[in-house]
Image (cartoon, rainbow, N blue to C red):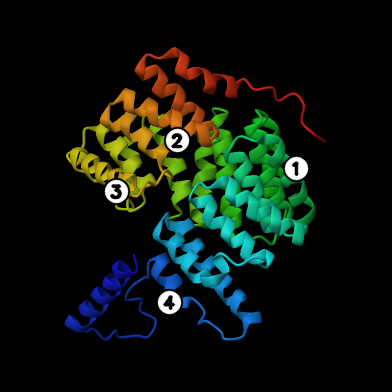
Amino acid sequence: MAATIAATMFCFAARARAAAHVPARDDIVLATLPPLLLAMRTAPAPQADTARAWRDAVAAARGYIEAGRSSSDPRAYGYAQAALGPWWSADPAPPEVLVTRARILQFRHEFAAALTQLEAALRADPFAADAWLLTASIAQTQGHAQAARSACLNLLRLADGLVGATCSAANAALEGRGEQGQALLERALNVPSAVTPAQRAWAWTVLGEIRAQRGAAAPAEAALREALRLSPGEVYPLAALADLLLDGGRAGEVRALLGDATRADALLLRAAIAAKRSGDADAAQLRTMLGERFAETRARDDATHLREEARFALEVDGDAARALELAQRNFATQKEYADARLLLAAAQAAGDASAAQPALAWLRRDTAKPTP
């Protein structure tokens, strides 16, 4: 991976030498660095002082993680681990190091290992809001609503009100209380808050997803477009909006929305689905590109894209049996609304009613006993 980045940086330099250009003014933007390269450029230099060394390592790792989160570039998480250096395996380690490790492990879907790191961090610092937020996120991904609810309640005490409300609203939707979660989040978004634009974009994204789940397509679209206004190019709300448009039979608009922003697998998947539905000339090319990417992830024994690969098999390749196998594997580790919906669709396409039962049971789960 390092060689790939080095080659990329060399190519940038080679182009600069081959076509030197002096702008007329100092404020003219010649190029915008991709998030990962920007993180590499701004990473703090290592310090000899041990007391500062772990802080610098965490700062560098978190820069890579943020670049990976915003762009869905998996390489960033490898660089994040490398940036931690000896702190990746240090025991004991400061809570900030433990939370940073957990973020990397979460991306790899090593949820149990991530939770172990977070439990240790919270034993050392019960007031670590970022540890509670990540705990809630992992619990929600796994469909563990009660554990997520507890973590969100701690966030309401420790973090900005909008952060806590967003966590609680997402959990309410997970428990089948979408109307309550939507109302909570709509109120919170109307209260002045000191959160960052990225955090506010997250809140609008969650609101958009809740509205979409409740069948309110137009308000959902408005929320997701507001998220993208606050955080342009962010992969997650882009993918969520693309899904909403696909559900509404607006495949042509998906292509316009995504443009050439298909470096992330999640976005290339939506583009390929839209191209197939619209009969676009490049549909076969997109299918081939995406198939090659999934082949590469399988070669690395990477199971982080099972949801996307299952959708590819179902909606692009038309391989219902393969889609069902992947959807079942995905549902064994991830139990969000999208995962249940995917398993149901794959089971229906494969004509296997029994395979749909876990998703149906999850959707009918008892949500009548929320803790106060």
Q: Residue at x 55, y 65 (%)?
A: 88
Q: Residue at x 40, y 17 (%)?
A: 348
Is label 1 in contact with label 3 (beta carbons under 8 Å)? Answer: no
Pick whichever of labels 1 and 4 is earlier in the sequence. Answer: 4
- Residue that carries the numbered disc 3 in the rendered image: 296
Q: CA distance from mark 2 to mark 4?
A: 36 Å
Most foreground residue, 11 or 249? 11
Image height of 344 relative to 57, above or below: above
Type of amino acid under label 4: Arg
Please identify, in this view, whether the residue under mark 2 or under mark 3 is nearer the observer.
Answer: 3
Residue 190 shows up from this direction:
no
Question: Whole-percent x and y of residue 187?
Answer: 71, 44
- Where disc 1 sits, the SS reads helix
Most foreground residue, 264 or 150? 150
User: Does 190 sit left or right of 42 as displayed?
Assistant: right
Question: Whole-percent x and y of residue 284?
Answer: 19, 38
- Where disc 3 sits, the SS reads helix
Please identify, in this view, whether the residue under mark 2 or under mark 4 is nearer the observer.
Answer: 4
Circle 2 packing at 10 Å, graded few (<14), some (14-19), many (20+), is many
- Residue that carries the numbered disc 1 in the rendered image: 150
- Residue that carries the numbered disc 4 in the rendered image: 41
- Residue that carries the numbered disc 2 in the rendered image: 244
User: Does 359 sit left or right of 268 as displayed?
Assistant: right
Type of amino acid under label 2: Leu
Residue 203 shows up from this direction:
yes
Q: CA distance from mark 2 to mark 1?
A: 30 Å
User: Does 123 sit left or right of 140 as displayed?
Assistant: right
Is label 2 in contact with label 3 (beta carbons under 8 Å)? Answer: no
